[in-house]
Amino acid sequence: MTPKHPSESLTILTDMVLPSETNALHNLFGGELLARMDRAASISAGRHSRQVSVTASVNHVAFNKAIALGSVVIIEAKVSRAFKTSMEIYIDVWVEDRESGERTKANEAIYTFVAVDATGKPVEVPQIIPETKLEIHRYDDALRRKQLSLVLAGKMKPEEATELKALFV
Ligand SMILES: CC(C)(COP(=O)(O)OP(=O)(O)OC[C@H]1O[C@@H](n2cnc3c(N)ncnc32)[C@H](O)[C@@H]1OP(=O)(O)O)[C@@H](O)C(=O)NCCC(=O)NCCS
């Protein structure tokens, strides 16, 4: 399988915040953002694998800044690392100032998707070759995040998470 670059799975969703998508403070409802990020990540995983891909886990979400009603929201998703059948998708969320066009980073998230066949059985995906400094950094850290996610899900024994353990010694 020919390896791919993260840029080949880049997915950008641009949308605005409507009243029905806000909380009592008139900011974007967290669950709405999670759904939008899941959609972008799903397209990104599909572009990388060219297979149906399902959300296996949400590894990290940081709601650092509230996003106000009427904001223009840009969600950028890219595969940061591919393993055997799973892919880590790194998502950056930006808010665009309507007048200046300036973008401010609002949130980020990391999802794991698994490529599956018609019966739902995991299938292999192409490997990733990171290119930019940021892509290389995210690629390098992805194995630790995978191990942490598997340990928390009870699918890996902590003593087997060698890359993760190296962080603490
Ligand atoms: C995701 C799913 C296909 C994994 O199936 P599984 O039987 O656990 O398959 P495996 O154990 O072979 O795992 C497949 C891959 O997923 C990875 N994986 C499974 N659970 C994971 C988790 N919690 N975190 C990170 N990776 C995970 C495994 O490490 C493996 O990766 P690799 O092949 O790249 O090494 C299966 O659990 C599923 O279909 N879940 C429902 C998905 C869904 O419907 N999502 C939408 C929610 S509404």
Image (cartoon, grey):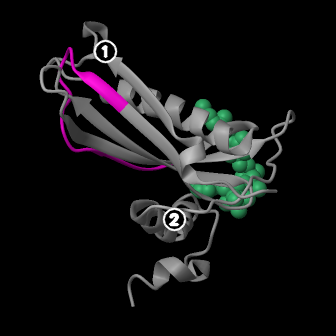
Instruction: Check the image and report above or below for 29 versus 139.
Output: above
Question: Is residue 49 at all visible to an observer of this figure?
Answer: yes
Q: Residue at x 40, y 61 (%)?
A: 134
Q: Residue at x 72, y 44 (%)?
A: 49
Outermost residue toward the right in this view: 119
Instruction: Check the image and report above or below for 33 versus 78.
Output: above
Instruction: Check the image and report above or below for 114 versus 96.
Output: below
Residue at mark 2: 139
Q: Residue at x 78, y 41 (%)?
A: 116
Question: The disc labelled 1 sits on which kind of residue?
Answer: Glu
> How many residues crowd mark 2 within 10 Å: few (<14), some (14–19), many (20+)?
many
Quadrant that contains the C terminus: bottom left
Locate residue 152 relative to residue 66 in the image: left or right: right
Magenta range is 57-74
> How many residues crowd mark 1 within 10 Å: few (<14), some (14–19), many (20+)?
some
> Is residue 65 located in the magenta-colored stretch of the structure?
yes
Pick whichever, 5 or 13, lies toward us: 5
Residue 162's image quarter? bottom right
> Is residue 16 located in the magenta-colored stretch of the structure?
no
Residue 72 got which mark? none
Residue at mark 1: 21
- Secondary structure of the residue carrying numbered label 1: helix
Question: Is residue 29 at all visible to an observer of this figure?
Answer: no
Q: Residue at x 28, y 36 (%)?
A: 94
Locate residue 69 relative to residue 116 in the image: left or right: left
Residue 73's image quarter? top left
Query: Where does the image place residue 4, in percent across and percent down from the top left?
Result: 66, 54
Q: How many marks?
A: 2
Residue 8's image quarter? top right
Query: Where does the image place residue 111, in percent across and percent down from the top left?
Result: 51, 47
- Secondary structure of the residue carrying numbered label 2: helix
Label whose residue precedes the other's in the sequence (2 or 1): 1
